[in-house]
Image: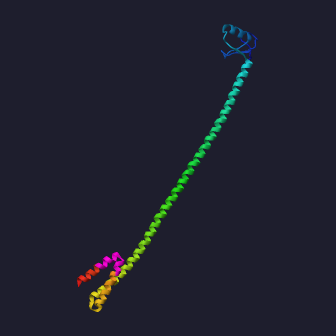
Amino acid sequence: DELICDIHAGAPLVYFCTDLPERLLCSSCALILKKKHPGFRFVEITEQIKFQKNHLLDLQASLNVNQKSIKSGRLEIEENYRRNIDSITSKFDEMIHFLQEKRQEMIDGVQKCLNENQNKLQEINKLLETVKRTVDTYLIQFDNVEKNQHIYGRRGLKTLFKLTQDLARSDPVLKEVLYFEESNLVLKK
């Protein structure tokens, strides 16, 4: 493994041929090769070692820069990823909140309509009960008049008819009912 020429005994290997990189040469071998191949280039082994070492150091520095750049790029990508995830999550949370508010507004609106309609139905039901009682009262009176016309007389009948007409004018549904009852009463006579 010594750097001694195999051809020229004891001569140290001092050159490196750039055209035949696998060969190390002593001074004598370099002269012979130079005569055979004038275009070949020879470099001292120590210079070639320095050159290769510097080349490897430059490559190492470039790799370190690239590695830092890749690491920085990876961190930037990860940060962008987190920002995008946060942004998407935030936007969806806003949309969900908006939709929940709208849903609640719609439910509240429907509930309000339901309550209003239930209140109106209760009022209508109360009115119908009142009208029913009034109609029942008048019907009883008409039955009594019909059975006992002689007791009420003309004046009593007129008063009764006037009351029912006034009541009928105030309620269109009752108007129909009373008109029908009155006409039946008149027709029966």
Residue 176 vs 113, above or below: the answer is below
Query: In this rendering, does residue 7 appear at all?
Result: no
Taking the spot 62% from the left edge, 39% from the top edge, the residue there is 74
167 drawn magenta: yes
Query: On the picture, is 178 further left or further right than 78?
Result: left
Measured from the top left, where is residue 97 in percent x and y? 54, 56
Residue at point 50%, 58% (across, down): 102
The answer to whether 123 appears left or right of 46 in the picture is left
Nearer to me, 147 or 56 = 147
Q: Please state the horizontal and vertical placement of residue 92, each as a whole percent of the image.
A: 54, 51
Judge whether 141 appears above or below 112 on screen: below
Question: Which quadrant of the structure image shows residue 13?
Answer: top right
Q: Main secondary structure of the magenta part?
A: helix
User: Which residues lie in the magenta part?
Assistant: 166-179
Instruction: Choose top left, top right, bottom left or bottom right for residue 188.
Output: bottom left
Residue 132 visible (yes or no): yes
Residue 128 lies in quadrant:
bottom left
Magenta region includes residue 154: no
